[in-house]
Image: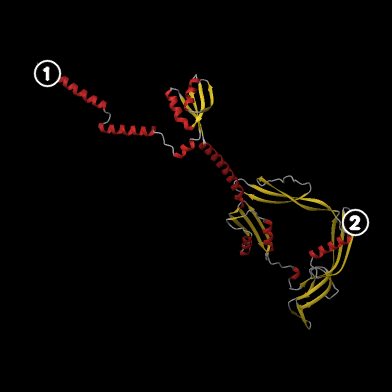
C-alpha cells in the first residue's frame, strides 16, 4: 500500500517536470503575446516587399505604345501559335533550340500571359521596346552631347576671363585708368585682347619710358617704368645747345647772349645761346631763351618695283590649337599671300594657345606710273613723313635699276634747334 503511493507520487512529480520542459520548448519567448506580435509584423513586411510598385498613369500610357518580346519553352509551336492568334497579333516569330520567341503589342501583355498560364507554358519577357525607352535613350545621348559641348565651351571660354591683374614696376592711377579703358579689370571677359595696342597706348602717356603687357591664362602682367630726369653734359649750364649739324640761317634771342652768327657752321652739341648777358666786361646770369635755325642737306631714296603685290580682298581665317604654347602655321589656300596672326594663351590645367591665322590673297600688278609721277609720289611721302620749317631747295633724280626704278631726293631744308 505504501509502496504504491510512493510510486504514484514519484510519477506525479516526473510529469510536472516534463510539462514545464515542453512548455519552455514550445514558446521561445517568455510571453506568448510578444511572439505573436512579432510574427504579425514580419508577415506584413513580407507582404509589402512582395507587393509590386504601382506605375503612374503616364508611365502606363507611354508603355502601351511599345512591344514585348516573349520567350516560351516548347518543342512544338504550331498549337501554341494557333492559340495565340485568337487573342493577340504577333510578329518576328523565331523557333530555335526548344524555344519560341515572338513580339506582341504591350497592350496585349495581360491576355498573352493569362493564355500561357492556362496552357502551362514556361515563359518570360526577355525585352521591352517602347516610346519611354526611346525617349530615355535619346535624352541620355542628348545630355552626353550637351555635356561635351559645355565642357569644350568652358575649356575655350575660361582663358578669356581676367581674374588677376599684376603690376610689376611703377604703377599709378594713370596706368590703371588706361588699362580700364581697354577692359583690363578683375572679373572682366576679354574675347580679343591686343597686347601690342595696350603697350603702345601706355607708351604714349607722358612720363613713361617702358611698358610691357602680357596675358597669361587668366592673369594680365603689366610692367611700367617711368622716365627718369635726364641730365646731359651738353646742357648742364642752361645754355641753348645745337641738336644737329648745319649752317645758321636765322637767330632770335629773347634772353641771354648769342654765341653764333648767321652763316656760321655749327655742330651738334655746340652752344648757340649762352645763359648770361654782358654788363661792361662782367657776365650777369640770365636764362638762355631764343630760336636758332640752321640749314642742312638731307637725302632720301624711294624704290618703285616693276611689279607690286596688292591684296585682292579675298581672305581665309584658320584656327590652330597648340598644346604647351606650340602651334605651327597652317597651309595657306593661296599661292601668294600675306598673313596676320592673333593668339590667346591659356595656363589653366593644360597650357595651350589658340591661334587665328588670317591669309590675305595678293597678286602681282605691273607698275604703270611714269617717271614724273614716281618723282611726285616719292617727294610727297618725304614731306608727309618729316617735319621741316621750310624747304629751301630740292633736287629729284630717277634711275633705272634691276627690277624697277630708284627715285633720289636731295633737299636743302631749314631746321629749328
Camera-nearest residue between 88 and 323 = 88
Q: Which residue is mark 2?
A: 400
Q: Is residue 72 above or below residue 415?
A: above
Camera-nearest residue between 333 and 351 = 333
Disc 2 or disc 1, which is closer to the eye? Answer: 2
Q: Is residue 32 left or right of residue 370?
A: left
Q: Position of residue 394 (x, y in %)?
A: 87, 67
Residue 188 visible in rendering: yes
The image quarter containing residue 43 is top left
Q: Which residue is mark 1?
A: 5
Q: Residues within 10 Å of mark 2 (few under 14, many from 20)?
A: few
Q: Is residue 208 left or right of residue 97?
A: right
Camera-nearest residue between 268 and 178 = 178
Name the element at disc 1: helix
Q: Is residue 333 left or right of residue 167?
A: right
The image quarter containing residue 390 is bottom right
Q: Position of residue 193 (x, y in %)?
A: 65, 55
Q: Position of residue 399 (x, y in %)?
A: 90, 58
Residue at screen point 26% across, 26% down: 26
Residue at screen point 27% across, 33% down: 34
The image quarter containing residue 210 is bottom right
Q: Is residue 398 above or below residue 76?
A: below
Q: Position of residue 29 (x, y in %)?
A: 27, 31
Residue 30 visible in rendering: no
Q: Which badge, 2 or 1, comes first in the chain's sequence?
A: 1
Residue at screen point 84% across, 73% down: 249
The number of numbered badges drawn on the structure is: 2
Camera-nearest residue between 224 and 159 = 159
Quadrant where the N terminus is found in the figure: top left
Quadrant where the C terminus is found in the figure: bottom right
Residue at screen point 21% across, 22% down: 18
Name the element at disc 2: strand
Amino acid at each position: 500500500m505504501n509502496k504504491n503511493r510512493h510510486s504514484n507520487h514519484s510519477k506525479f512529480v516526473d510529469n510536472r517536470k516534463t510539462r514545464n520542459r515542453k512548455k519552455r520548448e514550445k514558446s521561445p519567448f517568455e510571453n506568448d503575446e510578444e511572439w505573436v506580435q512579432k510574427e504579425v509584423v514580419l508577415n506584413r513586411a513580407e507582404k509589402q516587399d512582395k507587393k509590386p510598385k504601382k506605375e503612374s498613369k503616364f508611365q502606363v500610357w507611354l508603355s502601351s505604345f511599345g512591344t514585348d518580346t516573349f520567350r516560351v519553352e516548347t518543342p512544338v509551336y504550331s498549337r501554341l501559335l494557333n492559340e495565340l492568334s485568337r487573342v493577340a497579333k504577333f510578329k518576328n516569330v523565331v523557333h530555335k533550340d526548344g524555344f519560341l520567341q515572338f513580339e506582341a503589342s504591350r497592350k496585349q501583355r495581360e491576355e498573352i500571359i493569362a493564355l500561357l498560364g492556362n496552357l502551362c507554358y514556361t515563359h518570360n519577357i526577355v525585352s521591352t521596346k517602347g516610346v519611354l525607352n526611346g525617349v530615355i535613350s535619346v535624352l541620355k545621348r542628348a545630355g552626353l552631347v550637351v555635356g561635351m559641348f559645355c565642357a569644350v565651351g568652358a575649356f575655350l571660354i575660361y582663358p578669356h576671363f581676367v581674374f588677376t591683374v599684376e603690376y610689376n614696376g611703377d604703377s599709378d592711377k594713370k596706368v590703371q585708368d588706361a588699362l580700364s579703358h581697354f577692359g583690363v579689370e578683375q572679373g572682366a571677359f576679354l574675347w580679343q585682347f591686343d597686347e601690342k595696342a595696350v603697350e603702345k597706348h601706355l607708351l604714349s602717356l607722358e612720363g613713361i619710358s617702358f611698358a610691357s603687357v602680357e596675358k597669361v591664362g587668366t592673369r594680365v602682367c603689366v610692367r611700367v617704368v617711368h622716365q627718369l630726369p635726364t641730365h646731359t653734359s651738353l646742357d648742364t649750364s642752361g645754355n641753348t645747345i645745337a641738336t644737329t649739324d648745319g649752317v645758321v640761317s636765322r637767330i632770335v634771342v629773347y634772353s641771354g647772349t648769342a654765341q653764333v652768327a648767321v652763316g656760321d657752321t655749327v655742330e651738334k652739341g655746340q652752344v648757340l645761346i649762352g645763359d648770361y648777358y654782358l654788363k661792361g666786361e662782367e657776365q650777369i646770369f640770365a636764362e638762355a631763351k631764343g630760336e636758332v635755325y640752321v640749314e642742312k642737306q638731307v637725302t632720301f631714296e624711294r624704290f618703285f618695283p616693276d611689279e607690286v603685290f596688292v591684296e585682292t580682298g579675298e581672305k581665309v581665317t584658320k584656327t590652330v590649337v597648340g598644346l604647351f604654347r606650340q602651334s605651327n602655321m597652317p597651309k595657306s589656300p593661296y599661292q601668294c599671300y600675306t598673313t596676320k596672326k592673333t593668339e590667346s594663351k591659356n595656363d589653366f590645367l593644360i597650357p595651350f594657345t589658340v591661334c587665328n591665322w588670317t591669309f590675305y590673297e595678293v597678286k602681282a600688278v605691273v607698275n604703270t606710273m611714269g617717271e614724273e609721277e614716281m618723282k611726285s609720289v616719292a617727294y610727297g611721302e618725304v614731306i608727309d613723313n618729316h617735319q621741316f620749317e621750310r624747304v629751301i631747295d630740292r633736287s629729284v633724280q630717277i634711275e633705272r635699276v634691276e627690277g624697277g626704278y630708284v627715285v633720289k631726293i636731295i633737299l636743302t631744308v631749314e631746321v629749328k634747334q
